[in-house]
Amino acid sequence: MKSVIACLLLLLTSLLQAADLQRIVVSAPGPRNISYLPVDLIPAIGADKEEGVALSILHTGGGGVALNNMTTRNADFAVAGVPAALSLKANGGEVVVVAPVNDAPLFVLMVRTELKDKVKRIADLKGKVIGVNTGTKTSKTTSQQLGELLLKSAGVPVDAVRIVPAGQSWVEQSSLMIAGAADAVVGDEPFASRLQADGKVYFLAHLAQPETVKGIKGVNFLHAAVETRPDVIASDPAKVEKMVRMMKKSLAWIASHTPEQVVDVLGVTDAEERSSLIRALKAYPKAFSRDGKFSTAQLRETDVFFQSSLEPGALGQGLSIESMLADRWAGRRD
């Protein structure tokens, strides 16, 4: 009887504690996309509870969808590529960038192995089907912007290929490649390297390998960042401060722990997924911001990348990330 009462008291205490927590919803691509792991880690390491928050994560197939969840008030925040946020702003969307997540973009242009004799360079993708992260009518994903920029740099008009949504998770991207539903995908890590290790794809370009993207402007752009709406900042700046602090705690935790510890705390038990994540974390030690501060040099690169991706006369000409930046919580460095 005493044990039953003790259990009931423990349950009641937990419910009361949960009732005291502020609910914050963030939408981000994934799950377990390496560029967005700091989002998944926030509740896993208890960084949200430390701030008096119960964080809910809405995973999506692309940054454009995550931003749409934020603008339509299905989420308070989005974590998405800054070029995608610039695209949203160019199309009249209300979005403010409040904290960086990545230090280096890790996009990969991968091609199905069956095409190795036919597609040897980017120019050979003319007439092919290319998958990119899922966007919306008001926001072109960073993946699609990069894909179009790579094609243009190789002299391939964008309308000379067919663009299809590829999602931003292992299930979505691997299914597209293995089923042959796309010839190439501008995809993500660790999924791309896992497919390469399985002999399913080969790489034509990788942003972590500078020699493969020579001549592409702004490739050191800021990828994933925390974004929100202006009304959230105006009505509840403390909520924004908490979100930025949670992200900084997650980034600091990653910087002070091994890849194995990161994967352990995420509860990854599948052996293949576990090994691919560990390999990727070891291969890209500079994937994440170490201090959670905006880099002025990286912001400049982001402007160069976004402007280079635009077609003549497209919306967004002259738009700068500086016009949609609120750095008072995250801070800034050169």
Image (cartoon, helix red, strand yellow):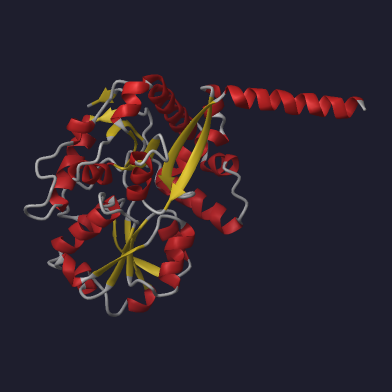
Q: Quadrant of residue 260?
A: top right
Q: Is residue 222 above or below residue 6?
A: below
Q: Position of residue 32 (x, y in %)?
A: 49, 49
Q: Is residue 41 above or below residue 167?
A: above
Q: Is residue 252 visible?
A: yes
Q: Residue at x 30, y 43 (%)?
A: 223
Q: Is residue 94 above or below residue 237?
A: below
Q: Is residue 200 visible?
A: no
Q: Position of residue 112 (x, y in %)?
A: 37, 72
Q: Quadrant of residue 231?
A: top left
Residue occupying the far right of the picture: 1
Nearest the camera: 85 or 218? Answer: 85
Quadrant including the N terminus: top right
Q: Is residue 249 above or below residue 84?
A: above
Q: Residue at x 32, y 53 (%)?
A: 107
Q: Residue at x 20, y 59 (%)?
A: 148
